[in-house]
Amino acid sequence: MGQIINFLIKYKNTLLFLFLFGLSIFFTIQSHSYHKSKFISSANFLTGGIYNWVNNIDEYFNLEVYNDRLVEENRWLRARIMQLNSKQRDTTFTDTNSYKNPYRFRAARVIKNQYAKRDNYILLNKGSNDSIQTDFGVITSKGVVGIVEETSKNYSRVISILNTNLSVSVQLKKSQHFGSLIWNGKDPNIVQLTEVPRLAPVKKGDTIITNGRSLIFPKGIPVGVIQDFELDQNKSYYTINVQLFNDMTNIGYVYVIENKGMAELKKLEQANE
Amino acid sequence: MNSLLISNSVRFILLVLVQVLILNNINFLGFINPYFYVLFILLLPLNMSQYKVLFLSFLIGLCIDFFEDSGGINAAASVFIAFLRPSILKFSFGISYEHQTIRYYQTPVTQRFTYISILVLIHHFILFSLEIFNYSYIILILKKTLFSSIFTILLIVLITTLFQKRR
């Protein structure tokens, strides 16, 4: 017994080091798996509060850009309304049942944005108090941003599409061929689309949209355009570089999408298994 | 002792804020950021007991991790250099460290530079290894370590020279 205590006293620094180092490695490993890094997160009141405070100042410098984006979006929406209005009413049959919208949008502001690391996270200024929950999609008027991973009362942490742990199911706009969108950690404007079969008609400049299979994003949210592509070594799948529509280095305001049918659909999927 | 506590606490808070609010957003050439908060560990009193050094280093690393959403990579790297600090001190300052007679700002410039460089390099290497977490990217890890270290070392040398107490 005495020997053990002597040993502990003699090596207390080494033991403390091993303990603390082990603890940090444990946190690191947790952070590399999606949905597990609950403890170390900037979505708490202290870090979130500080980021929010600084962002209040920072926001003024970007007002012009955000304004331009809003005007552009309004223009697009107006054009859409005119298009719909111009259809002859009496020949179009409208089913009032279809007015029920399964998606609900909430606006939020980005208070911290990362894009230079390999695993990037974004912090939003709204959380569970505003009914934002895990697995809600996050988009801007231009395209996909990420998925809510964790929420606190007033803040939520979003796993950015610029994160090597995330993959989003997307498809070509022209055909129904789908693949998964991942990031190789290099250029914050370019993400990679993999697993698109060889038969798909892939062309430079084609648009990529979300395909709604993941239940998180509705179908048809724009992602980006094809910049270049190559056939994989085994010659059956394309690897495509996609230029994002979003400028991920300056996001500003985002919309958080809630899929109201998610719980029901998940239940159904589980029942199938 | 009390003034030491205050100055170290102020330095702790100041370095964390400067790191997360300013330096993490530099992204020079797309990926080069200095990790200036290492200065806190370098400047802890040289005769401080080792378990305190380990604990404080862990704390500052963890603080940065909370802000950066980076798991525990900063904590791990900080604890690691805190553990190595006594041996590096012995290596760079030699016999005068053994007699506990040196103060940081009275050491010769070259010895101080060695001390800073070795610790910063080790810190950054651990940091980026854990961040990337994949040894097939070893070239990227080394590249990031090298460039970020140069940036950090320059900044530390510059700032410590500026804030050196005149006597």
Image (spheres, coloured by chain):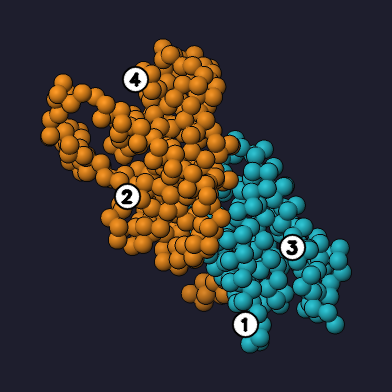
Q: Nearer the viewer, mark 2 or mark 4?
A: 2
Q: Which residue is mark 3?
A: B156
Q: CA distance from mark 4 to mark 3?
A: 55 Å
- A29 vs B43, left or right, is left
Which amino acid does the dot numbered 4 rest on? Answer: Gln
* Quadrant occupied by the C terminus of chain A: top left
Q: Chain of mark 1?
A: B
Percent of width and height locating residue A168: 39, 35
How far is the residue under mark 3 from the one under mark 1? Answer: 21 Å
Of labels 4 and 3, the one closer to you: 4
Spot the residue most to the bottom: B2
Query: Which label is found at residue B6?
Result: 1
Do we see residue B54 in this rendering? no
Residue depicted at x 16% and y 21%:
A91
Which chain's colour is orange?
A
Tell me the shade of chain B.
cyan
Q: Residue drawn 54% across and 33% down?
A: A190
